Amino acid sequence: MAQKNVSWIVWLRRAAQTVFIILFLYFFVQTVFRPGGPGKGLAFFFNIDPLVLLTVWLGGHAAAAALLLSLITVGITLLFGRWFCGWVCPFGALHNLMSSWRGGTNKARIDAGGYTPWQKSKYLVLLILLIAAVVGANLAGWLDPFSFFYRSMTMAVFPAVNAGLQHFFDFIYRLDPGIGKARLTLLTEPIYRWLRYYLLTMGQPHYFWSMIFGLLFGVVIALNFFRARFWCKMICPLGALLGLIGKNPVVRLKTNPELCHDCKLCLVGCQGGAGPNGEAGWKPSECMFCWNCQAGCPSNAVSFQFEVPRSEKQ
């Protein structure tokens, strides 16, 4: 019953994640055909990233006017918490998708779904990046989620997909399988021409760093099978920054002790390791407001409510 009552907001969040990751990939493909850096569409994601604004300002005491869009992200986060990570970030959406493919029993998911002190490591990553920015080293360009996702797609993922599809269609063309006049190339060649026009590129260069980024990207994605959204919980400096900004939001998780049976099923789908079961206290700075905890509670004991912010230790 609980899952049906809140399924609409879970599906709304999934729809938002789908829209933003499709937009990111669409703008990325447009950029591929217009070399010289991220195009205007893709630049939008960097402009709403407050980590980019902060590190650029710390490094040069000035920032492009477009980066001031990230102040909207800051304002929303101050009021409503770390929604950006759970609803907007396309790299987070990819981690969410990969995490949903994990196997295992509910018990295993409960054991891995709670809060762990290791999640503080992302705050150390953030501190290192900010110190580096002050001394003139822009390390955020390596670990900011948009930068990391863009570099990985540019240097490793897209070249691999591009080469793989090229070799596949070349192989079909040379083999020319079929029966009589019914040849497979009658189907594959129009598809190949369409892909050549809208997606594939010819003569794409490969570099040593492509292999490095491909390996790092593969490891980061694979870690989702160890712990859901590992990058977001343990590494992401933008998530750490938003967690600090939104640690006292007006939307707060509440657990009704009279209805809670301590089944811990709210931990099964928890994306942020925010401790929704309430044993050590819900941690707003880790919560991505995915609503999975409320959807997974069989007794309707978990809910999100508006509440006037108060000063408290997180």
Image: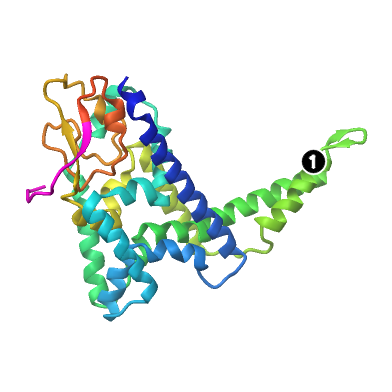
Where does label 1 land, which residue? 187
Q: Is residue 212 visible?
A: no
Q: Which colour scheme is used?
A: rainbow
**Residue 25, image x and y in percent?**
52, 54
Which segment did they paint magenta? 303-314
**Residue 214, image x and y in percent?**
48, 54
Does the magenta-highlighted stretch encompass residue 85? Answer: no
Front residue of this view, candidates 171 and 263: 263
In this rendering, the answer to whether 95 lies above or below 68 is above
Q: Which residue lies furthest to the left in this view?
A: 312
Figure disc tally: 1
**Residue 134, image x and y in percent?**
23, 75
**Residue 47, image x and y in percent?**
39, 66
Residue 57 is drawn in which quadrant?
bottom left
Residue neighbourhood size for the residue with mark 1, other residues' Cα within 10 Å, grouped as few (<14), some (14–19), many (≥20): few
- What amino acid type is highlighted by mark number 1? Leu
Predominant SS of the magenta segment: loop
